[in-house]
């Protein structure tokens, strides 16, 4: 039985996108693949409002989070931590042997521009790593205002995890001045897992060339050089997923990012209003995510049991993550989902829980 996914990844994938993966295989060292990748890059630049280098890795987003640190940090990085996934990124940097300083906010609260500015004025940081949309808490940090702070520190590389927001939230990469923008395809892109997208500024590319232990698979310089040579990738890509990405980007371009963003906002506002009626929002007011909503389980329901019953009806939401399991639950409204589909799952939750 197919369960329609309202979880923060993998998200619901439309049948025509799934079918796009069944095309006949092509060689990844052919002009046909080179043309495919070039078309993908051009469409990515269009929806992300960027002229910077775009790269597609056969990897989860976590791989490129590690890659960004390996490429752009010789020694010291400031990690902004306000949830499970930003904490994981800090641990990734530690595992890569970097000196990690942590700027921490309570779970449920955003990282603020003032917090970052105060830390950067202390000096000594090569890079700042920020998770834009904390999937564990449903919190969106104010990236537009943080961008203004970052412009005052031009020597600091700005690394941003937009894994669960890119292609759903409005992120104008060049306008914001992000140096490395990271996303995964199984979130708001509404594709199967297995690919990660990176947008890399020239400043970050220049820094990469000064870091000599940056690894091999996620080497930004090697990726860009190979693309400039023949529009290919250094290592074997997931060709079938590239077919799906190409088709999905056509659909996103046709919808238009402004319209796609408005659809996500509409779903988010509807879900938040529903949560406020029946539960409580976990995220601090004014800092709620555009792509998922985290509800505080103030009624003490058994989230796992709720999901079991939803599964019988063909739906799935997500329990709280990590230490928030059963204390919260999460409803994703990202990708190609519609407001009618969001209404449908919420009506079923009301019926199962006998909410009034």
Image: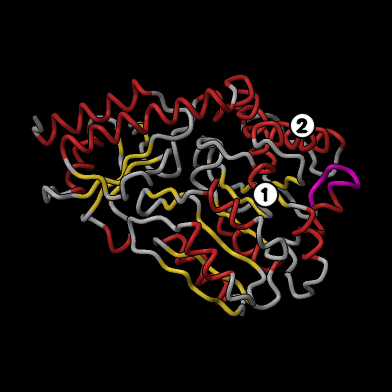
Which one is nearer the viewer's eye here, 131 or 194?
131
Question: Residue sitting at 14 percent across and 50 percent down?
Answer: 298
Residue annotated with mark 2: 39
Q: Residue 231: say if magenta.
A: yes
Mark 1 vs mark 2, CA separation in Å: 24 Å
Residue annotated with mark 1: 177
Position of 288 compared to 328: left or right?
Answer: right
Magenta residues (range)? 227-233
Q: How many marks?
A: 2
Q: Quadrant of the C terminus?
A: top left
Question: Residue sitting at 42 percent across and 28 percent down?
Answer: 337
Lower sequence index among marks 1 and 2: 2
Note whether 135 is above or below 343 in the view shown. below
Pointer 2: residues within 10 angstroms few (<14), some, or many (20+)? some
- Residue 253: x %, y % from top left: 64, 24
Colour mode?
A: secondary structure
Which one is nearer the viewer's eye here, 174 or 249?
174
- Residue 83: x %, y % from top left: 39, 61
Pointer 1: residues within 10 angstroms few (<14), some, or many (20+)? some
Note whether 338 is above or below 41 in the view shown. above
Rendering quarter of residue 208? bottom right
- Residue 162: x %, y % from top left: 54, 48
């Amino acid at each position: 039985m197919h369960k329609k996914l309202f979880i923060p990844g993998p998200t619901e994938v439309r049948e025509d996108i799934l079918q796009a993966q069944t095309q006949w295989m092509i060689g990844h060292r052919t002009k046909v693949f080179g043309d495919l990748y070039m078309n993908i890059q051009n469409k990515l630049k269009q929806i992300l409002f960027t002229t910077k280098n775009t790269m597609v890795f056969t990897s989860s987003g976590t791989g490129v989070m590690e890659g960004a640190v390996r490429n752009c940090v010789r020694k010291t990085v400031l990690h902004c931590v306000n949830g499970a996934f930003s904490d994981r990124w800090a641990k990734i940097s530690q595992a890569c042997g970097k000196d990690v300083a942590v700027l921490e906010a309570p779970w449920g609260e955003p990282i603020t521009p003032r917090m970052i500015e105060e830390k950067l004025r202390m000096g000594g940081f090569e890079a700042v790593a920020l998770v834009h949309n904390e999937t564990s808490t449903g919190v969106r940090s104010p990236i537009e205002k943080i961008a203004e702070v970052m412009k005052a520190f031009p020597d600091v590389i700005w690394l941003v995890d937009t894994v669960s927001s890119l292609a759903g939230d409005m992120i104008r990469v060049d306008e914001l001045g992000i140096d490395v923008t990271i996303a995964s395809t199984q979130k708001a892109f509404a594709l199967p897992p297995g690919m990660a997208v990176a947008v890399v500024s020239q400043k970050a590319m220049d820094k990469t060339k000064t870091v000599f232990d940056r690894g091999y698979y996620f080497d930004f310089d090697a990726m860009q050089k190979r693309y400039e040579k023949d529009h290919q990738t250094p290592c074997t890509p997931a060709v079938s997923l590239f077919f799906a990405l190409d088709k999905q980007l056509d659909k996103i371009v046709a919808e238009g990012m402004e319209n796609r963003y408005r659809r996500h906002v509409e779903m988010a506002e509807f879900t938040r209003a529903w949560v406020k009626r029946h539960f409580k929002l976990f995220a601090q007011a004014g800092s709620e995510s555009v792509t998922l909503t985290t509800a505080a389980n103030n009624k003490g329901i058994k989230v796992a049991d709720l999901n079991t019953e939803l599964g019988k009806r063909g739906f799935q939401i997500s329990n709280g993550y990590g230490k928030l399991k059963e204390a919260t639950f999460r409803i994703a409204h990202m990708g190609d989902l519609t407001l009618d589909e969001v209404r449908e799952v919420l009506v079923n939750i009301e019926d199962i829980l006998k909410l009034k």
